[in-house]
Amino acid sequence: MKTLDYNTIDLSKEPPVKEPERQYYFIAKAKKYVMEKSKEAGRPLTFCVVTFGCQMNARDSEKLTGILEQIGYREETQEELADFVIYNTCTVRENANQRVYGRLGQLNRAKKQNPHMLIGLCGCMMQETEVVEKLKKSYRFVDLIFGTHNIYKFAELITTRMESQRMVIDIWKDTDKIVEDLPSERKYSFKSGVNIMFGCNNFCSYCIVPYVRGRERSRSPKDIIREIEHLVADGVVEIMLLGQNVNSYGKNLDVPMSFAELLQNIERIDGLERIRFMTSHPKDLSDDLIEVMKHSKKICRHLHLPVQSGSTNVLNKMNRRYTKEHYLNLVDKIRAAVPDISLTTDIIVGFPGETDDDFEETMDVVKKVRFDSAFTFIYSKRTGTPAAVIKDQVPQDVVKERFNRLLKEVQQISSEECSVYTDTVQEVLVEGINDHDSTLMTGRMSNNMLVHFPGDDRLIGKIIQVELKQCKGFYYLGERIKE
Ligand code: SAM
Ligand code: SF4
């Protein structure tokens, strides 16, 4: 996190135009208002950041938390009790939107009990015009609404809200801007997500992401490396490089650099032990990347490679730009180079026009590849995407039946695949105390599987050797090998 003395900023002057200096100015200003509010309340003010959706949102939430802490919100607490609540929303599937509306209703009741409470909404769902219209009309108690492109302006928007006492809405259609060096507060001391790019240019026909996250922009390798070096100096041993399609990293840079080259540069950072990345689009996964993974000592033995469907016909309508055969060949190539790799995937069931035969092709890919795990989704119609206007929607009962069959197959294969490491010794990064049994610690293997074993919290953040004694389907019980 940036350590800057915000008290030295002269608030009698006009705010700077340049970023991030402008935001430092507003952090200082918002801090003054929060201090006043806290005096009025007679206690430190609390906050709650609620994250919906993917790893990108999780990383954005760390940035929101960093700013809230810098401006003086002290402790994170439950949402009904907090003085500042922000929902970082997702809109990939329709049910994500419904969940937000439901929770907002409850939050309104809590706000009536707490005159200091402010409610903010940000993230992908806010990029949809109908959503903002609905909020403006029926959710007047919301204080602040902003989207995915101007999250860096959080402190400035809070200041505007505190000065105006009215609902503040700031949504941008798109941006080519990347603002570096803002505060962020990591959830874990030993691991962190690192954005390497923002947005997406792929326009898969079912997907709303390109419309709500904008065009693809890569961060400069210099900024990425500098951020990782700082993280490592601050105790981070594992990083997850984040992008909607990491394999197309660097294409729009002034001096283009491939993702494989970026990985090689990151690998050279002393003290960094593990590198993960997501997500990889099968159409762009290069032989160079496979070579780099093969020789790397730090890249984890896990690849998330969303297939979406096993039918070339459906893939075509999805605008995925690969065929079933291409995907299966790619899997063979990867496994030949990195035999112990764990492969996971995303699958959508019930894309418009999906026939029984198309679905059988998906089942065939699942049986052939034998994924270590798979996220299975029922197709959700997203207004504004090309697939939403395809007439041929699959009846719900047919989708349900296919979905259940797929899930059963995926789970069966997954439990068989996961047990192959029983009685081996694996390196495990210890992540925390087990949620259900405080005598156990929980760690993660290179292949992303979880292991629970007796230990104590002094191990958190360390990479240790654990013997895997028993496979429990999706995780292991193990014992630490003392070195
Ligand atoms: N960029 C990543 C990729 O291309 O694989 C994933 C982004 S998306 C947030 C995560 C997953 O949500 C996708 O892989 C897809 O399986 C699923 N998804 C996206 N749009 C969907 C929709 N309209 N209905 C159901 N699932 C969807
Ligand atoms: Fe959506 Fe496709 Fe972009 Fe992934 S690659 S975010 S699925 S449009």
Image (spheres, rainbow, N blue to C red):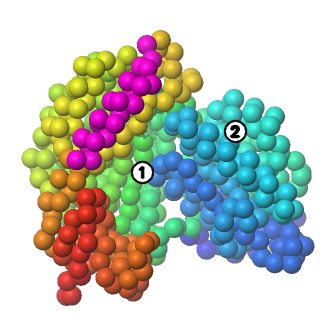
Q: Are marks 2 and 1 in contact (CB under 8 Å)?
A: no
Crowdedness near tag 2: few (<14), some (14–19) or many (≥20) residues, C-alpha within 10 Å: some
| Residue pointed to by mark 1 | 242
Callout 2 secondary element: loop
Q: Residue at x 35, y 73 (%)?
A: 442
The residue lying toward the viewer, choosing from 423 and 255, is 423
Decide if residue 61 is on the left or right side of residue 357.
right
Q: Which residue is drawn at 17% across and 38% down?
A: 367
Q: Residue at x 43, y 72 (%)?
A: 436
Residue type at numbered disc 2: Ile
Q: Residue at x 51, y 47 (%)?
A: 53
Decide if residue 109 is on the left or right side of residue 416.
right
Q: Magenta span covers which residues? A: 392-412
Name the main secondary structure of what is drawn in magenta.
helix
Tag shown at residue 171: 2
Residue type at numbered disc 1: Leu
Q: Quadrant of ligand 2?
A: top left
Quadrant where the C terminus lies? bottom left
The residue lying toward the viewer, choosing from 14 and 274, is 274
Decide if residue 110 is on the left or right side of residue 451.
right
Task: State the image coordinates of residue 390 (x, y, percent, origin top left).
Answer: 47, 14
